[in-house]
Image (cartoon, rainbow, N blue to C red):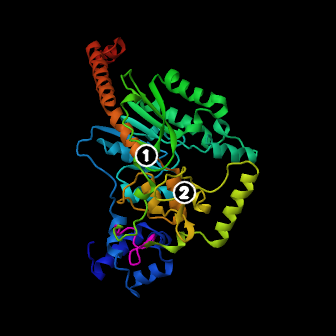
């Protein structure tokens, strides 16, 4: 780990306070705001890892800039950049980002920087979107997810396309595609999108993409469990501006049995890596154990057990998901911060615990260089709403040859249009104006 002098730490801290609030830095370091204030005032000495951690926060580590990118893309409904990473790894360069959640934007910019236009609300913004080869869009899934529909039904609120906000955001994607005509697009949503409203929602989406916009469209449900030890099925829709020979048969999906939870858990045998940007927020490297705050309290554990018994007696399947290092998990959700019930890690001789945010990052396929600059609550929400990144790395791999072919075809077509326009010469009206 790089060693920093007290003076260097003070300089880094001053820069960090220009970009982050004290509360955000406190969350990142696992301390309170008064400690940050005392560090800034020079009243106390920062923790040994502070210099390296500040450097990580200030230097985007996940972005992969290509001197001569093979293609460009825009990242809409970007979240924390899971789809983006997959396409960067295959030669793409992001030229525009949209994400409305301020906490997700914080995580995104810390990891990828802000070298291009970054806007919040995408609604009605198609005029400012730059030219690009691929549109990426993980549009909001809550209006279509089983949990989201159930919750809205119980509250008497509309869902799907009837949702007055999130449900209509697919049509914002449509308008961007219509205005910019990219060579390809990639859309992601929950598996339930196909069955929502007896399949009518999905029929509308496919009709818009194929018939109205004229794209060659393919869809497939892929389980992230092929890449991490988590059952997480998502539908992926890809489209090309011209007919291609694309096929999902080219996917290489590892066996689900090749991954187990122990692969992503903190290691208690002394080999857990020391991450400057995590410090001791999640793991105690002195005692080689996960911090006690992630172990369920007696009251919460008793409540979850009683809740499970009640629903089991009623014939329902609701309950907690208890797993060990040899097992696999249920789908990580955005509500994980509430009680962690869908994924509880067994601890011999004591109550189970939640996954730490770092373990959630690993469960979603993010490597340990990915910085988590927000509170545990926000981190759980972000990873629960994210994608399994390696899935999109594989999707990008099989898409790329067809994308490059369509991109070349569009370039030839455009050149032919420009040549024809130049060959025709000025119109009669133009000639009259020139003579005058």
Q: Which disc, if any, is residue 339?
A: none
Q: In the structure shown, which secondary structural element does the residue marked by tag 2 occupy? A: helix
Residue 245 % position (x, y): 36, 22
Which mark lies nearer to you, 2 or 1?
A: 1
Q: Residue at x 71, y 58 (%)?
A: 309
Q: How many marks?
A: 2
Would residue 96 be seen by someone viewing this image from the given angle?
A: no
Name the quadrant containing residue 169: top right
Q: Which disc, if any, is residue 257?
A: 1
Q: Which residue is mark 2?
A: 381
Question: Which region shows up in magenta?
Answer: 273-288
- Horizontal relation, residue 302 to residue 223: left or right: right
The question of residue 266 being in magenta is answered with no
Observer-nearest of 102 and 190: 190
Give the overall secondary structure of the magenta segment: loop
Q: Residues within 10 Å of mark 2 (few under 14, many from 20)?
A: many
Residue 334 % position (x, y): 57, 54
Q: In the structure shown, which secondary structural element does the residue marked by tag 1 occupy? A: helix
Residue 381 % position (x, y): 54, 57
User: Looking at the rendering, in which quadrant would you find the N terminus?
Assistant: bottom left
The question of residue 281 being in magenta is answered with yes
Question: Of label 2 and label 1, which has the lower sequence position?
Answer: 1
Instruction: Identify whether 258 is placed above or below 103.
Output: above
Instruction: Identify whether 119 is placed above or below 401.
Output: below
Q: Residue furthest front?
A: 349
Observer-nearest of 376 and 332: 332
Disc 2 versus disc 1: distance between alpha carbons? 27 Å
Q: Decide: marks 2, 1 in contact (CB < 8 A)?
A: no
Name the quadrant containing residue 247: top left
């Amino acid at each position: 780990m790089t060693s920093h002098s007290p003076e260097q730490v003070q300089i880094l801290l001053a820069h960090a306070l220009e970009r982050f609030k004290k509360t955000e830095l406190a969350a990142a370091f696992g301390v309170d705001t008064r400690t940050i204030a005392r560090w800034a005032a020079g009243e106390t000495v920062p923790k040994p890892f502070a210099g390296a951690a500040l450097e990580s926060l200030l230097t985007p580590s996940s972005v992969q800039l290509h001197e001569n990118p093979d293609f460009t893309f825009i990242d809409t409904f970007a979240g924390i950049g899971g789809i983006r990473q997959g396409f960067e790894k295959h030669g793409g360069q992001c030229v525009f980002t949209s994400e409305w959640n301020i906490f997700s934007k914080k995580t995104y910019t810390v990891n990828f920087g802000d070298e291009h236009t970054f806007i919040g609300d995408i609604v009605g913004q198609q005029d400012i979107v730059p030219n690009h080869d691929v549109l990426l869009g993980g549009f909001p899934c809550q209006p279509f997810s089983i949990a989201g529909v159930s919750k809205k039904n119980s509250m008497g609120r509309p869902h799907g396309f009837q949702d007055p906000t999130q449900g209509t955001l697919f049509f914002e994607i449509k308008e961007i595609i219509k205005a910019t005509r990219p060579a390809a697009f990639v859309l992601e949503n929950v598996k339930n999108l196909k069955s929502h409203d007896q399949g009518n929602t999905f029929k509308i989406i496919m009709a818009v993409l194929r018939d109205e916009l004229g794209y060659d469209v393919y869809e497939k449900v892929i389980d992230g469990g092929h890449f991490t030890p988590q059952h997480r099925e998502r539908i992926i829709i890809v489209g090309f501006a011209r007919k291609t020979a694309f096929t999902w048969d080219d996917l290489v999906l590892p066996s689900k049995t090749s991954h187990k939870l122990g692969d992503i858990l903190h290691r208690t045998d002394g080999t857990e890596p020391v991450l400057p940007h995590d410090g001791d927020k999640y793991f105690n490297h002195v005692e080689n154990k996960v911090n006690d705050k992630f172990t369920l309290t007696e009251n919460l554990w008793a409540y979850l057990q009683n809740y499970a018994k009640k629903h089991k007696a009623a014939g329902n399947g609701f309950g907690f998901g208890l797993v060990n290092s040899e097992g696999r998990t249920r789908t990580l959700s955005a509500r994980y911060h509430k009680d962690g019930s869908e994924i509880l890690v067994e601890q011999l001789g004591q109550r189970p615990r939640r996954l730490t945010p770092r373990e959630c990052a690993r469960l979603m396929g993010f490597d340990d260089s990915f910085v988590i600059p927000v509170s545990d609550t926000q981190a759980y929400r972000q990873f629960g709403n994210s994608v399994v990144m390696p899935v999109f790395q594989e999707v990008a791999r099989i898409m790329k040859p067809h994308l490059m072919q369509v991109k070349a075809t569009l370039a030839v077509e455009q050149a032919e249009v420009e040549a024809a326009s130049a060959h025709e010469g000025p119109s009669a009206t133009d000639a009259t104006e020139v003579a005058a």
